[in-house]
Amino acid sequence: MPHPIISEFDIIFAGGGSTACVVAGCLAALDPSLTILILEGGQHTLDQAAHVQPYKFITHLVPTSTTMTFNVGNPSPRLNSRAPSGANEFWMRRYIGANGRCSDAAHHYVYNQAHSVNLQIWAGKHMKRVIFQDKRAVGVEFASDPVSCPDAGQSSSIMKASKLVVISAGTFGSLAILERSGIGAEAILKQCNIEQLVDLPGVGENYQGLRDHNLVFTSYFAAEGTVTMDPLYLGEENDIVQKNLAQWKIDGKSLVAQNGSDAKIKWHPDDDELKAMGSAFQPQWKEFFQDRPDKAVALFSLSAGSSRFSHNFPCREYITANYFTLYLVSAGSVHIKLGENGQEGVDFNAGFLDE
């Protein structure tokens, strides 16, 4: 049933990831009289297979995904002139419930309140800026998202907020909204022809979007006959996929309810391993890790299947070793910039291996 048209909301969330869904859902449940709007870049995910079937998680990580926004960084001499990338994810997915479905914030905090006319989600919307009146946020300007709605028009709309505007658009999105709204360093805003409202030079600095971990996938041939996720990753039409889907619809079980990774190791090096790592790591070890046994230096995990980021893999079974490095020291920066064509881009310095 369509919601009634509301000309002004009490609270507007710019971005519909985990933070927005949890906070907006809790506020709506505690005070049903509040009118709350979530503006989300991605499309609706209610009961969509790609968002509720765990085995499909890998489809969101490929370069052609419309549920991820990939941001290519500036080439770095520390990476042999390679250009790193980082991503913002629409509608965060996380855990697998006992029913074999992905248990995410959107389904469990927002979609379960579909009966509430005062909690609304407008999907496929790109947040341009926050509108201020005497340095108080009073609304937002937005348009159709060019990634998830490439065929939609790009005309802007404005929605007012009587109480609060919450910026919750992820590492890349939130910083861009702040700078487009005139909040940031004067030099950055001036280059983009944006009038500065608040001098806040820390906006976009100390980038930590991937600082929590870097990840390397290394795939190996598995023994013939090993049960892996590979037949499911190959496509929807084969008999193995259909058999597993049929079982999942009955009882929530089968490979459809798996992400392929059930074993992980948290690694805290012993004395011999520390010596082998060399002297460069010693200051960080003593300052952060030595007295924190709960803080792993790295995670190792196994996945029953290949990452499928490359189409050059032969069609067969694989086992993939995943290596995560944690609590990195290096930090970079993310800012908006104007390209030669006058279009907005991202000035992204990942800072990988800079320290």
Image (cartoon, grey):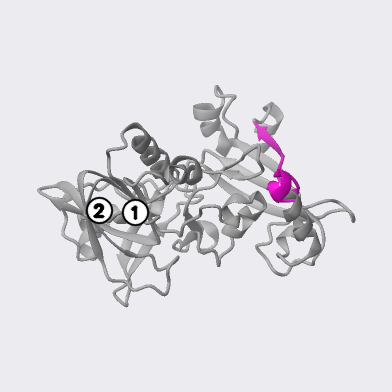
Quarter of the image where the N terminus is located: bottom left
Residue 154 picture location, percent across and down? 32, 71
Which residue range is magenta in the image? Answer: 249-267
Residue drawn at (72%, 40%) of the image: 262
Q: Does the segment drawn in magenta span residue 253?
A: yes
Residue drawn at (55%, 22%) of the image: 291
Residue drawn at (70%, 50%) of the image: 249
Task: Answer with left or right where residue 322 lies relative to residue 337.
Answer: right
Labels 2 and 1 touching (C-beta < 8 A) = yes
Q: Secondary structure at mark 1?
A: loop
Is residue 14 among the parts visible in the rendering?
yes
Q: Which residue is mark 2?
A: 6
Q: Which residue is mark 1?
A: 3
Residue type, mark 1 in image: His
Residue farthest to the bottom, as pictured: 341
Residue 113 picture location, percent across and down? 42, 42
Give the camera-side residue of 105 and 220: 105
Give the camera-side residue of 252 and 179: 252
Residue farthest to the top, as pictured: 291
